[in-house]
Amino acid sequence: MSDEYRTINKESTGFFKDKGSKFYSYVFPVENEEEVKDILVRLKKEHHSARHHCYAWRIGTEEIKFRANDDGEPSSTAGKPILGQLQSYDVTNILLVVVRYFGGTLLGTSGLINAYKNASIDVLNTVEIQTKLIEKKYELSFEYPLLNTVMQILKQEELEIINTDFKENCKLWFKVRKNDAERVLEIFADIFGVKITGGG
């Protein structure tokens, strides 16, 4: 089972023009719908004289949520072609917005679909798409005498420590690649005195 996903790590811009209409495209890395709302508010302020701010987003790594919005364009002529490109490039945790300035000539249904699709392709081709691992986070609790044993396993398995708290007892948080999680949990479960929680 795949434990990887494709995403972007910075925003970028693109552009497409057809019969006087200008299509400015933007991509943003996003983690949740709140970020999407904030970006849309910002773009609508920046492009307050534009008629349409159409967009699509995909969020999540294992279960992907998505949405497409035509923002006043004829149904399925804007949001759907934008979403189609996000799916075609197989990217997630991403928002793609296309801002349209009307040029005076109607483009028709197929013209609009083509324009929003090409504006999306243009911006996706400007940005580096990265493959990242789906990781699970766990917390370990144990007494001091087990510290060396625990640290040895973490080193052997090349696990990333996120945080530690060694005040009274030992607490430690680490990340593990999803496909390795079960095996690593079994190793820790075999050590008497180590308590493991989490998995988000």
Image: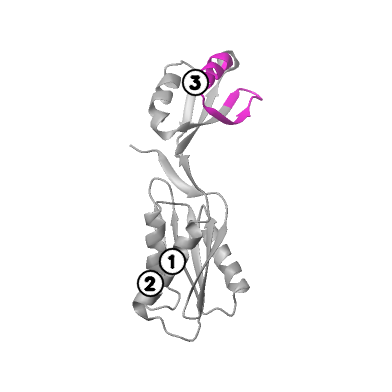
Please provide the residue range marked out in magenta.
147-171
**Left or right, residue 104 beside residue 147:** left
- Foreground tag (2 vs 1): 1
Any mark on residue 118, and which? 1
Residue annotated with mark 3: 194
Circle 1 residues within 10 Å: few <14, some 14–19, many ≥20 = many
Circle 2 residues within 10 Å: few <14, some 14–19, many ≥20 = some
Residue annotated with mark 2: 113
Circles 2, 1 touching at the beta carbon (< 8 Å): no
Colouring scheme applied when the structure was drawn: one colour
Secondary element type, mark 1: helix
Question: Mark 2 is on which residue type?
Answer: Ile
Q: Is residue 106 magenta?
A: no
Q: Nearer the viewer, residue 108 or 10?
A: 108
Percent position (x, y) of residue 79? Answer: 41, 68
Q: For residue 183, what is the image quadrant?
A: top left
**Rounded to the nearest whole Å, what is the CA distance between mark 2 and mark 1?**
9 Å
Residue 115 shows in the view: yes
Q: Nearer the viewer, residue 93 or 152?
A: 93
Query: At 53% across and 30% down in the image, what residue appears?
Result: 174
Q: Earlier in the sequence, mark 2 or mark 1?
A: 2
Query: At 43% across and 50% down in the image, what residue appears?
Result: 60
Percent position (x, y) of residue 97? Answer: 50, 66
Q: For residue 179, what is the image quadrant?
A: top left
Q: For residue 66, what is the image quadrant?
A: bottom left
Percent position (x, y) of residue 115? Answer: 43, 71
Query: At 48% across and 57% down in the image, what residue appears?
Result: 124
